[in-house]
Image (spheres, grey):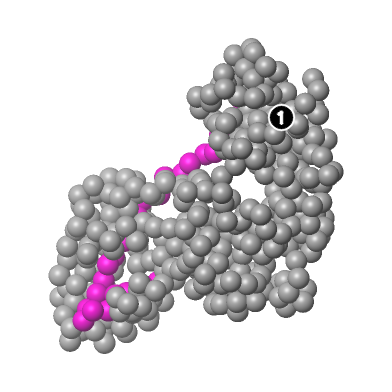
Amino acid sequence: MDSSYFTEKLLRWYPHNRRDLPWRDTRDPYIIWLSEIILQQTRVAQGLPYFYEFVNKFPNLAQLAAAPESEILRSWQGLGYYSRARNLHACAREIVHQRNGKFPDRYKDLLTLKGVGPYTAAAIASFAFREPVAVVDGNVYRVLSRYFGISTDIGSHAGKKEFESLANQLIPKSNPDEYNQAIMEFGALQCVPTNPDCLNCPLHPDCFASKRELVHNLPVKEKKTKVRPRYFVYHYIHAAGHIVVRKRAAKDIWQGLVDFPLEEFSTKEAIFSPKPENLSAFRELASLGPVFETHVEKPWRHILSHQRIFASFVEIKLKAAQKSQLEKWATENGYTLTDEQGLEEMGKPKLIVRYLNQKK
């Protein structure tokens, strides 16, 4: 099969079908890096508002590096995969403080940056510095596997090597940036995961999968992600307009974000209409005579890549005069008190944001 034909067709298709996105038509590595980190595991429609917010709030690398981590996490709130935000911040600080504020201009050097893997390094290297190194993401896997008829598991080490090798054979040295944009855009708009419009595809005449009716069988990904259920009861504890919050620790989901005191249970049944006597926080505060309310009969559900969170929220309200006693209890348990404005400015998991919005 003529690989030059494949490359030519993509390059002809791209100028007439490309989306007008703000990180295109620039060679600024900061803008390209920022967009690529935001768009990891994220659809363009969802990521676009975050991109604009970050560019407006942190227009250059130095300002991003100088910002406190809490501000970065607050701006990232709702986007998920928060390790990306922490790595983004760490990478910005490394470049500013250890590399004189300049991005490496070669693929192999970009790989040494915090949070920058092969895909992101290839994107920066090709788009900013026109180095002929291929990007390989989900869109590229799909296009190559279908057109060339590759059934190697894309989740396997062998599969990743095979696709990476083919992608780098196809990329033209004269315009690697445009080719990389073209194949990713083709996968996003034309060769989509389900029900692609094959009859109106410029690659249709020579596409292996289309000719053999294998479009829905490719690419192959055999290993499924195991999803673990978790069962939370959150305590919304407050007095005199101040709420008890906690900062989530390392080695668990939502590291560095703020949520409420919680108890985790081993079964789903334990979080349906939780009772005061079953919750340690209520028992500990019982001498203060709190008012206890369960706001939801059916637990909230929040889906992550490897975890499925089921959560109930209970409200524990104390009198204004008991605020100092509540603050003492919070401090002893590693929590803090904040007012509503302070809570609004903190970075929070989307699940907590949904609950707070429902309370308004």
Q: Which residue is drawn at 20% across and 49% down?
A: 297
Screen quadrant of the N terminus: top right
Residue under label 1, please give it. 9
User: Mark 1, residues whose alpha carbon is within 10 Å: few (<14), some, or many (≥20)?
Assistant: few
> What's the residue at 63%, 31% (across, down)?
142
Q: In front here: 126 or 321?
A: 126
Please tell me in which quadrant of the rendered image residue 188 appears: top right
The amino acid at mark 1 is Lys
Image coordinates for residue 55, horizontal then vertical, percent: 55, 67
Q: Which residue lies furthest to the top in this view?
A: 212
Task: Give, as a single range, the part of the protein colored magenta.
Answer: 222-246
Dominant secondary structure (helix, strand or loop) of the stretch shown in magenta: strand
Q: In this orientation, does residue 190 appear?
A: yes
Q: Which is nearer the eye, 270 or 301?
A: 301
Residue 285 image position (x, y, % from top left)? 23, 74
Quarter residue 173 falls in: top right
> Residue at left 23%, top 79%?
241
Q: Can residue 80 be seen in this view?
A: no
Looking at the rendered structure, the secondary structure element under dot 1 is: helix
Seen as rendered, the residue at the extreme front is 16
Q: In this view, does 343 lie to the left or right of 142?
A: left
Percent position of residue 319, x then y: 16, 80
